[in-house]
Image: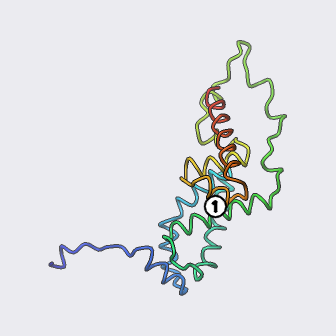
Amino acid sequence: MPASNAVRVPMGDSADVALAAGGDRQAFERLYRTHANRVYSLCTRMSGSRTKGEELTQDVFVRTWEKLPQFRGDSAFSTWLHRLAVNVVLNARKSEGKQASRTDESDVGDERWDVAGHAPMHIERMDLQEAIANLPAGARRVIVLHDVEGFKHEEIAELCGITSGGSKAQLHRARLLLREALQR
């Protein structure tokens, strides 16, 4: 095939992983560019905050750089990175304590309803992302892991330290709360 018709095939994750594990910062940067948006999206959905999502994404890639030499290749790099991201978010939640998962009841006052009993426009326009962000932490984690990221209940149970039945119950509760929030 003539050189002018040759198609440049980008290096796959496996080559970049091997190079980055050996300390190649350019290979790591390529991995970062390839996976940063998905990691950010996961961290933001699980934390319920864009700012926290940004912080957690940075933490995930710092941990990735540290742990990359331990990556054995038993699964795809993207799977390994995804699990690492979930663990970073869950560990951050544990260290923050339960206070971050509570909502301030004073924020939910009578101003939510007008005289006719209708919600103001900003509440009627609540989108799915905002509704997910407003779920209790446990329900938010489970719905993101199951419905968005595709984890099975057994995997969620292992990641979150709960039973698979607990995962199913939290998912059911999360869906009910979402439905209720979106119907307002």
- Residue 124 in percent (x, y) is at 62, 27
Which color mode does the image show? rainbow
Give left or right: position of 127 versus 137. left
Determine the secondary structure under disc 1. Answer: helix
Give the answer, above or below, for where 13 lies relative to 45. below
Q: Residue at 60% x, 42% y: name it.
A: 129
Q: Residue at 54% x, 80% y: name it.
A: 72
- Residue 20 in percent (x, y) is at 52, 81
Residue 14, quarter of the rendered image: bottom left
Q: Nearer the viewer, residue 70 or 65?
A: 70
- Residue 92 in percent (x, y) is at 74, 61
Q: Quadrant of the C terminus?
A: top right
Q: Amino acid at mark 1?
A: Val
Q: Nearer the viewer, residue 166 or 85?
A: 166
Q: Quadrant of the N terminus?
A: bottom left
Residue 2, quarter of the rendered image: bottom left
Residue ID for mark 1: 86
Q: Residue at 60% x, 74% y: name it.
A: 64
